Amino acid sequence: MKKFKTILKDKSLRNRILFVLGALVAFRLLAAVPIPGIDNLRLNQVLDSNQFIGFLDVFSGGGLSNLSLVMLGVGPYITASIIMQLLTVMVPRLKALYSEEGEAGRKKFSQYSRIITVPLAFIQGYGLLALFQKQGVFGDIGGGAMLFNVLIIVAGAVFLMWLGELVSEFGIGNGVSLIIFAGIVARLPRAVGQLAFAYNPSDLPTYIAFALVALIVIAGVVFITEAERPIPITYAREARGGRTAFGGVHTYLPMRMNQAGVMPIIFALSILLIPQLAGNILSTISTNPTILKIAETLAGWQQTSPTYIAIYFIGVFFFTYFYTAITFDPESMSSNLQKNGAFIPGIRPGAATEEYVGKVLTRVTFVGALFLGFIAILPIILQSITGIASLAIGGTALLIVVNVITDLMKKIDAQVTMREY
């Protein structure tokens, strides 16, 4: 209550929060305006039967579920950011730009991501509209009308990218994450309504068990998200100007258990959904019976099959290590510590420090990778057990919601503390 009163009294902090709320209202209004000529009944059938579109709907902030003006959401911008981060592994210049050239380098890196977003939005927009047209969601339209619709949804994607960056600059928290978060939360009332409509007294034990599992899973996600392994760091004492001594400070280097966040699940899902996407494309462009049979097999790959679950878990586990290796470099860490006169007690500077940090990172990441893999497949397992999609908790959406809320709370706390001082 004390923090809440501080927020209300402080004009700057209050304006930041109001700016975030205003931006989210603008986004939800645009997400409620569909492109013309849609068969809503057919659209709902396609969304229920297509995992790829359901996955994209999460990152569109719910805008894809009714083919709105912002149906692409921040998906193209996220894809562009992932491409740029992967390129840092192959292009040393980009790696130096991102990690060594400070704020100016990161701004230029972000600008490249924005530029790549536009062609990606065109490709995704046209591909999705062509897929929906093939599925009979709206009638056969000409090339001019298709181009017009593509331009509208590309403009919507660029607008959301701009809005997200405005929120990051003038609001509180990460704007892109908050837009995704708003779309996920906006779907909760409909899910609750479906559960209430289908309620049967005999299902009460199932609902109670689900509530308990949900609380345990959310607590576990928060715990693992916040968990870290501290590595003690000591700065050497230096004598300057005769008797004045500096340094000798003891601190620690926090090694987060979930260093990669939600990205491994996104990578693994993207790869797993390629066969289904390829099947949809093949069925659209070919009339050959053999190719159509292959396309039907690919498009019908069920996510409840044991093979799918096993590959999904292994993919998340692998990409956790892969993404951690991209974002955290023990060699650079060791070099920076040595340059600043810092060392790990009992470990020699240089190669020994690099080896030690790498070993700790590998062990910590192992636990985080197992947990991420479990959270990723949990919705599939729960849906298989209960047979109710609304009772499937876990996966990308839960991780995004937990990460956004914890990050937002930390930033609000930091703002309040700064004003108290």
Image (cartoon, rainbow, N blue to C red):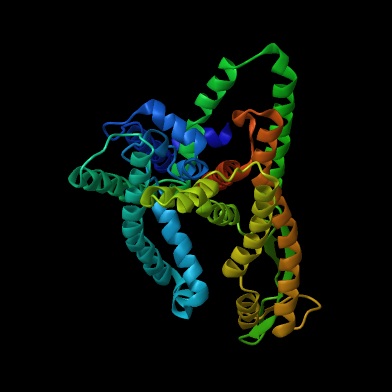
- Closer-to-camera residue (275/92): 275
Residue 337, picture quadrant: bottom right
Residue 141, picture quadrant: top left
The single residue placed furthest to the top in the displayed view is 201
In the rendered image, residue 77, in percent from the top left (x then y), is placed at 40, 55
Residue 66, picture quadrant: top left
The single residue placed furthest to the bottom in the displayed view is 242
- Closer-to-camera residue (229/243): 229
In the rendered image, residue 350, in percent from the top left (x then y), is placed at 69, 84
Q: Looking at the image, how many numbered discs can be counted on the residues?
A: 0
In the rendered image, residue 340, in percent from the top left (x then y), is placed at 62, 79
Q: Is residue 351 above or below residue 113?
A: below
Q: Is residue 15 above or below residue 266?
A: above
- Closer-to-camera residue (401/243): 401
Residue 251 as seen in the image, left or right of residue 399:
right
In the rendered image, residue 94, in percent from the top left (x then y), is placed at 44, 75
- Closer-to-camera residue (17/404): 404
Q: Residue at x 47, y 71 (%)?
A: 87
Residue 23 as seen in the image, left or right of residue 414:
left
Residue 323 as seen in the image, left or right of residue 370:
left
The single residue placed furthest to the front in the displayed view is 289
Residue 224 in view of the camera:
no
Q: Residue at x 71, y 67 (%)?
A: 361
The single residue placed furthest to the left in the displayed view is 144
Q: Residue at x 49, y 45 (%)?
A: 52
Image quadrant for the N terminus?
top right
Residue 388 in view of the camera:
yes
Q: Is residue 34 above or below residue 249?
A: above
